[in-house]
Amino acid sequence: MKKQTDQILTERVAEITRRLRKLYPKARVELDYGNAFQLMIASILAAQNTDVNVNKVTPVLFRKYNGPQAFVDADTAELEKDIYTCGFYRQKAKAIQAVSRMLIEEFGGEMPTTMDEMLRLPGIGRKTANVVLGEAMDIASGIVVDTHNLRLSRLLGISEQKNADKMERELMQLVPQKDWIKYGQWITWHGRRVCNAKKPKCGECVLADICPSRRVE
């Protein structure tokens, strides 16, 4: 019975992948960045915030602080002002300086290129590590499971997990590794553009006919 269920899930995920690949051929992380380090910093700023708001801050921020050493040397109060509009600015300034300091002390100022190394950085979890490794380095170490992926995976009947790490492990068994990077991006784009949490556009959704949670319109 389990093999049959696994086969059904694998086929459903394959069909979802096929449709979203066609719908979002240019899907990417929507944070603006110039290198892997900048994407990591932008991801820290994006917590409890929107990519749009972060993208308003980072152009000036990255001109002012051009690398890990610049953030370490920064006056913390001034850095807090620079990122104030991103919310939780005190915690985020502390996190940025801590991760920058460890990059210098443990990695010679260079970005790690493996999941295990990324997870050694303070405040960096699997989601941010997957974003940076996948988007900036094209390294498929896992699948980004953000709020959109958590929600859509349950709605689509792919997973019942509420824990992001547990859901990621399930998805990694269902999605071919060659699609790990893009799959997370496709789901995020669909969650933002069509399957909105408050008002899903089921009538416009290319997945409606295979979605057990679709609403009749």
Image (cartoon, rainbow, N blue to C red):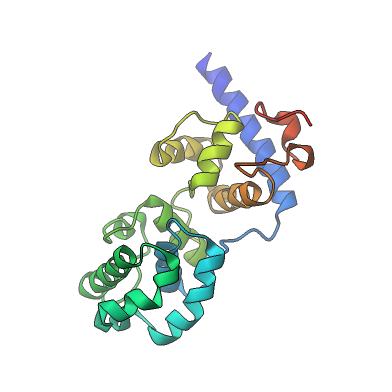
Where is 26 relative to 11, above or below?
below
Q: Return the residue nearer the eye: 24 or 201.
A: 201
The mark total stands at 0
Q: Which residue lies furthest to the left in this view?
A: 105
**Residue 121 figure quarter:** bottom left
Residue at x 33%, y 78% (from the top left corner):
79
Give coordinates of residue 96: x percent, y percent: 32, 69
Left or right of 98 in this view: 32: right
Residue at x 72%, y 43% (from the top left corner):
19
Residue at x 35%, y 53% (from the top left corner):
125
Q: Return the residue nearer the eye: 7 or 109.
A: 109
Q: Which residue lies furthest to the bottom in this view?
A: 64
Of the 4 image quadrants, the one containing the C terminus is: top right
Left or right of 137 in this view: 28: right
Give coordinates of residue 174: x percent, y percent: 54, 35
Give coordinates of residue 206: x percent, y percent: 75, 40
Give coordinates of residue 127: x percent, y percent: 42, 52
Residue at x 70%, y 43% (from the top left corner):
18
